[in-house]
Image (cartoon, grey):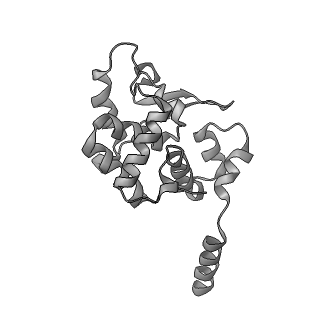
Amino acid sequence: MEHLSREQLVEVLRCAKRERERDWILLLVSFWHGLRASEAIALTAANFSDGYLTVQRLKGSLRTTQPLIEHDDELLNERAAIDGWLPRIPSGGRLFPISRVHFYRLMRRYGRAAGLPQHLCHPHVLKHSIAMQAIRTAGIENVRQYLGHRSIASTGAYLRVTDQAASAAVLEGSRKG
């Protein structure tokens, strides 16, 4: 599954924040909660309450309620970003009043600025990135629930590895044992 490394993610977020705070927060929230582009751009202040984000996932997925992420690195501190952003949103207004196509263009722009290869410059890579970051440590069932998947088969895609990754892991394991 194609995803961003932590370094790539941080660089994309840095590029977005440098240009426009709204875009940085959009990418940050999309990453931390594994949101689809349509889910992210539909968010309103009503989705946020008491330090949590509640989202009805699309494509037949579940409703999820997750805490906003606090992080020592300001660039990754979603809680602080949202706490500063929500008061600026008009009552009933969307946090990110853009289209899915515009979100794609933003991700392409910031991905290029961060030096990413073109195939990683799309919004869905943020969902893949949080899933791949969490799958090994949190386990498949926790990631399934976090992403709002009804079926474990949907989450199972994040367990697939390339031949290159499998070979590297086996080689590394053989060096230790």
Query: For the view shown, which residue lies furthest in the left direction?
Result: 18
Q: Nearer the viewer, residue 138 or 117?
A: 117
Q: Is residue 21 above or below residue 142?
A: above
From what the image shows, is residue 165 above or below residue 112? below
x and y percentages locating residue 84 in the rendered image: 27, 30
Query: What is the total number of numbered labels drawn onto the structure image?
Result: 0
Q: Is residue 29 visible?
A: yes
Residue 127 point in image, percent of width and height: 53, 45
Residue 67: in sight, yes or no? Answer: no
Nearest to the observer: residue 52 or residue 125: 125
Picture coordinates of residue 35, whole percent (x, y): 52, 37
Q: Residue at x 50, y 34 (%)?
A: 66
| Residue occupying image coordinates x 49% and y 25% | 42
- Does residue 111 appear to the left or right of 84 in the view shown? right
**Residue 25 in the image: x percent, y percent?**
36, 37
Q: Quadrant of residue 27?
A: top left
Q: Residue furthest top?
A: 91
Where 51 sits versus 94, above or below?
below
Rendered-image quadrant of the C terminus? bottom right
Residue depicted at x 64% and y 54%: 158
Of residues 46 and 99, which is closer to you in this image? 99
Question: At 43% across and 21% down in the image, what residue appears?
Answer: 44
Left or right of 171 in this view: 110: left
User: Quadrant of the image for the N terminus?
Assistant: bottom right
